[in-house]
Structures are given as C-alpha cells and as structure tokens.
Amino acid sequence: MNDLISIRFDDIDPASPLIIAGPCSAETPEQVLTTARQLACKGIKIFRAGIWKPRTKPGGFEGLGAPALPWLKRVKEETGMYTATEVANRRHVREAVEAGIDMLWVGARTSANPFAMQEIADTLAEVASPDMPILVKNPVNADIELWVGALQRLYNAGFRRLGAIHRGFTVYGSHLYRNEPQWNIPVELRLRLPNLPIICDPSHIGGMRELVGPISQQALDMGFDGLIIETHCDPDHAWSDARQQVTPEVLSCILDTLVIRDARQATESLATLRRQIDTLDNELLDILSRRMEISREIGRYKKEHSMPVVQSNRFNDIIRSRVAMGSQMGMSAEFLHDVLLAIHDESVRQQIEILNDNKPLTPEPEK
Ligand code: PEP
Ligand code: MN
C-alpha cells in the first residue's frame, strides 16, 4: 500500500492536524444544525455524525438511519463543511453515497468482521467514486492483522484515499480508559504502512470528556495526523456517549491549547520517537508491576499450601519458551536470558517477602 493518496480535501491545510468533529449520533435536525453551525464558527471543516449506531446491547439509541441523511446535506449546504458518517453494511454504503456524504468511516465492531468489510468494499467499488476518503477504525480487539486486513480489502477494491482511526481496544473489567489505547499498536501500524494517515479518537479511548485533551496531546506528540472528537451542542443530554462529548466551545479551547509538533523537522521527529519510547517504557513498567502482583498472589497460595517458592522445572520451562519466542522477535538469547532471570529473581524476592509476612528481606538498619 505504497501509493496511498491524502485523505484531506483540497482546501484543508496539509500542515496542521486533520480535525473531524460532530456528535456521536444525529438526533434531531436542530441538534445537528446547531452543533454544525457552532463548529463551523470555530473553523472546523469536517463534520461527523453517526446515522446508524452499532450498540452493544439492544434497547439503546440505534440511530435514525436514512431519514437523518438529509440533515447532513443541509449541514454541507449551510456551513460548507464536509460530512462524514459510519457505514456498517451494503445498505448504509448505498444510502450514504447516494446522499452525497463526503467521507465514510467503518466502526470498530465492523472492522473486526472480514465478511462485513468485504461487503462494504465490494459495494463501495460499485457505487462510490474511487476518490472517496474512507477511514477504518481499529477492531475492538487488539489485532493489528485484522486492522490491516480491513484496509487491504478497501485498497483491493480500488480505494487509495485511506486512513486509520485509533479508538482503543476493549479489555475486560473497569479501567481508567473506556478503551485501552495500547499505543504500541498504532505505532506498529505506522511502521508497517508509513503512508497511511492515522487519526486518533480520544473520545472513544477516554470515554469521558476530561480525558479528551490529554489523549489528543499524546496522539499529536506521537505523530498522529489528526483527531476525531465527539462534539455536541448539549453533551449532557446526548442520546449516546453523553459522558465523552464536549461542546464546540470546549473543543475549540482544547484545540487552541494543543501543542502541534512539526514531525517534518529532523529534531522533532527524534523527539517524537523518544516520546514513543517513553510511552512504551511506561507500559513496560506497568506490565512488570502487574506481573509482580500476580507473583505475590502465587506466593500467598504457596504459603497457604506450604509449597517451596522456587520450582526449578517451572523456571527452566519459562526461560526456554520465552527465550525461543523472543529470539523469533529479533532479540538475542543472551539478552533475553538476563532480562528473564532478573524478572524471576525479583518475583522470588517478592514471594519470600510474602512468606516472611511482608517483612523486607534486608531490614533497614536501625537509626
Ligand atoms: C462512533 O464513532 O460513534 C462509534 C460508534 O465508534 P466505535 O466504532 O469506535 O465504537
Ligand atoms: Mn460514539
């Protein structure tokens, strides 16, 4: 996919981040038009609104479907903004293209489904101009192959104005983020497909409006090409995703305070890479501390069952399998051995602390 073409429209500044904003869902003509007018006043050029809403469970607001499409047409006529909506099947594609929508995106539940992706790609090839810009959100599960595969289906159907949207990944349980960013995945996508623009969706990653600004800054720091931010004229009363939507006024403040880095500068791209390293190091520390917590849990089990802390078979198996796996990932066996041994030593130390009722192994000297 080396011959991708920009997803930007001609009158959009190629040097600044591409900003797409608008409500999670189109609810009423008034809500759509009011939000769009306010966004246009703030200089936003691309308006998003969900017409068909994939809801996890039945009973939520599922979007108004085709009857809401003319509202987007009005947004375009009245404000001059480009319009974007989500498509998930053949009928959506036909209706959205027929209604003159300028840009389409495929949602996270759909990009995880190769049958749906193929149906969308085939229908687009039939009814849309090859100039149509199409964005693909990451699949809900953290599978980069599925994400790349979804993009490839559109590429194979003749589309070159493609982009990716990073909206985070589902993990079980409650966490700070609604969808875990796992930044290493979009970073890997960038390395694999350097010409593919990547847009961050801080609204769906964070799940709450307070996180929209910080996540947006992090994305720009990491060299993302733009942001898609859910914006509503009355967020607290939104029919879907109320917690994460901001007003056009707040959006404008967020955008004004973002530090935009010029990735084209050599020093700046170095800084971008360093920030990626910082993020990965933080993730590494987080993973290590979670691993240690599990070790301590095992320590408590061993204590209860009077088992020895070190079980050499298990240790040898761990080292052998991990060294083999890591070697396949391009790291030296010696390095892997040292790292795994150090991790194992620290796990043992923590388990022995548990056996000693949390007394540190080397007590502090008395003062
Ligand atoms: C959306 O953009 O409103 C949406 C449904 O997003 P996602 O597919 O990321 O859940
Ligand atoms: Mn939403």
Image (tube, rainbow, N blue to C red):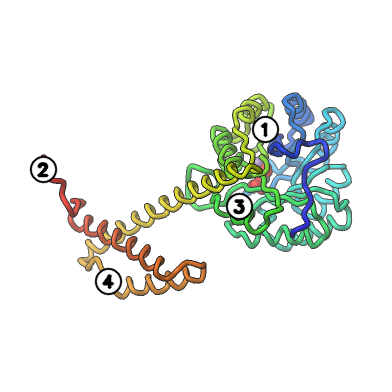
Tell whether label 3 touches label 1 (CB within 8 Å). Answer: no
Which residue was labeled with disc 4? 311
Mark 3 or mark 4, which has the lower sequence index?
A: 3
Left or right placement of residue 25 versus residue 268 in this view? right
Q: Residue at x 18, y 51 (%)?
A: 359
Say whether residue 55 is visible. Answer: no
The yes-or-no answer for disc 4 within 8 Å of ligand 1 is no
Question: In this figure, which residue is indicated by the disc labeled 3?
Answer: 186
Q: Nearer the viewer, mark 1 or mark 2?
A: 2
The answer to which of marks 4 and 2 sits earlier in the sequence is 4
Disc 4 and disc 1 in contact, CB within 8 angstroms: no
Counting from the top left corner in percent of width and height, residue 251 is at 64, 29
Disc 3 to disc 2, how far (Cα)? 50 Å
- The residue to which callout 2 is attached is 366
Helix, strand or loop under label 1: loop
Q: Which residue is mark 1?
A: 231
Mark 1 neighbour density, 10 Å: few (under 14) some (14–19) many (20 or more): many
Towards the viewer: 42 or 15? 15
* Residue at 59 percent of width and 36 percent of height: 244
Q: Residue furthest left?
A: 366
Q: Nearer the viewer, mark 3 or mark 4?
A: 3
116 to 14, vertically: above or below: below
For badge 1, the amino acid type reads Thr
- Percent from the top left, x then y, of residue 185? 58, 54
Q: Which of the marked residues, 1 or 3, is nearer the chain's N terminus?
A: 3
